[in-house]
Image: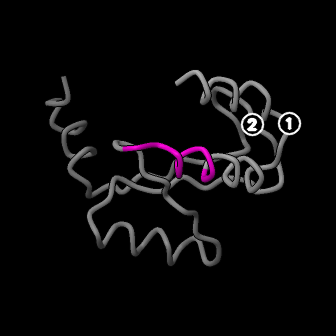
């Protein structure tokens, strides 16, 4: 975890693609328990529809050319699948 904190603290101004490349190299050295998920580019609506068909909670869309910004930001969007089990729990108020 120490390496991850160092990675985050020194990479805030680095673009998403550069941060992901650094993260890939770091995760590749991990023995067990971590898995790198690659990113997709292209038709966002098509990617979202596919994620919904797979039953995923949603997708996160990020600007590839910008640095990291913590908290809510216009640099990234979390787009939720309204039919996912997670959203069903929110509607039913059974998430606690």
Residue at x-position 70% and y-position 35%: 73
Give the quadrant of residue 49.
Answer: bottom left
Residue matched to label 1 = 13
Could you classify mark 1 by the number of other residues whose Cα lies within 10 Å: few (under 14), some (14-19), or many (20 or more)? some
Residue situated in front as seen by the camera: 48 or 33: 33
Give the quadrant of residue 39.
Answer: bottom right
Query: Which quarter of the figure is the C terminus placed in?
Result: top left
Q: Of the numbered discs in the image, which one, if any, rests on residue 87? A: none
The mark nearer the N terminus, 1 or 2, is 1
Residue matched to label 2 = 68
Residue 27 shown in magenta = yes
Could you classify mark 2 by the number of other residues whose Cα lies within 10 Å: few (under 14), some (14-19), or many (20 or more)? many
Is the stretch drawn in magenta largely helix, strand or loop? helix
Residue at x-position 46% and y-position 68%: 48
Above or below, 39 against 72 in this view is below
Q: Is residue 95 left or right of residue 18?
A: left
Q: Is residue 18 left or right of residue 33?
A: right
Instruction: From the top left corner, tell me how far across and down residue 63 is, in percent.
Output: 74, 54
Q: Cβ–Cβ below 8 Å for labels 1 and 2?
A: yes
Instruction: Identify the magenta region.
Output: 24-31
């Amino acid at each position: 975890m120490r390496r991850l904190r160092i990675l985050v603290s020194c990479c805030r101004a680095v673009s998403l693609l550069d941060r992901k490349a650094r993260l890939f190299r770091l995760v590749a050295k991990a023995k067990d328990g971590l898995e790198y998920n690659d990113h997709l580019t292209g038709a966002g609506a098509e990617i979202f529809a596919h994620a919904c068909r797979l039953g995923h909670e949603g997708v996160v869309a990020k600007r590839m050319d910008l640095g990291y910004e913590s908290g809510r930001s216009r640099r990234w969007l979390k787009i939720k699948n309204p039919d996912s089990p997670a959203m069903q729990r929110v509607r039913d108020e059974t998430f606690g």
